[in-house]
Image (spheres, rainbow, N blue to C red):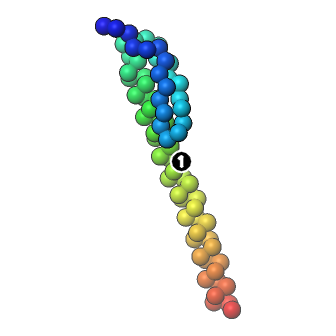
Amino acid sequence: MYPVASAVIVNIIGSPILAVPESGENAAEEITGVAARTKHTAVTDIINNSIENNKTDLALLFIFTLLKILI
């Protein structure tokens, strides 16, 4: 078997990551693992940002509702 390249750049959602496998045999597993972790982190960040945005929207809705009731 031919060894895989020693360094492969994986680009997921605009984040370049340098994956440097230890050996040619498990290179694909390591690169796949880096890609999966990066994708998971990106999805987690998107979900967390969405939750924060929803909290802000709910707070503004609550404030405007109170103002509407009081005025």
Q: Is residue 57 left or right of residue 12?
A: right
Toward the viewer: 69 or 2?
Answer: 2
Q: What residue is at 54 percent from the left and 32 percent from the top? A: 16
**Depicted 42 relative to depicted 19: above or below:** below
Residue placed farthest to the top in the image? 1
Which residue is rendered at x = 44% and y = 32% of the image?
35
- Mark 1 falls on what kind of element? helix
Crowding at mark 1 (Cα within 10 Å: few <14, some 14-19, many 20+) = few
Q: Which quarter of the rendered picture does the C terminus lie within?
A: bottom right
Q: Quarter of the image containing the N terminus? A: top left
Where residue 55 sits in the image (x, y, percent)? 58, 65
Considering every residue shown, the one lying at the far left of the view is: 1
- Residue 62, relative to residue 35: is it above or below? below
Residue 23 image offset from top left, x and y in percent: 43, 11
Q: Which residue is mark 1?
A: 45
Above or below: residue 66 compared with residue 31:
below
Using the image, determine if residue 8 lies above or below residue 52. Answer: above
For the point 54% across and 36% down, which residue is it? Answer: 15
Residue at image position (47%, 37%) is 12
* Three-letter code for the amino acid on which mark 1 is drawn: Asp
Determine which quarter of the picture holds residue 60. bottom right
Label count reads 1
Q: Pick the residue in front: 23 or 1.
A: 1
Q: Position of residue 48 (x, y in %)?
A: 54, 52
Q: Is residue 20 left or right of residue 71?
A: left
Residue 5, position as x, y percentages in the image: 43, 14
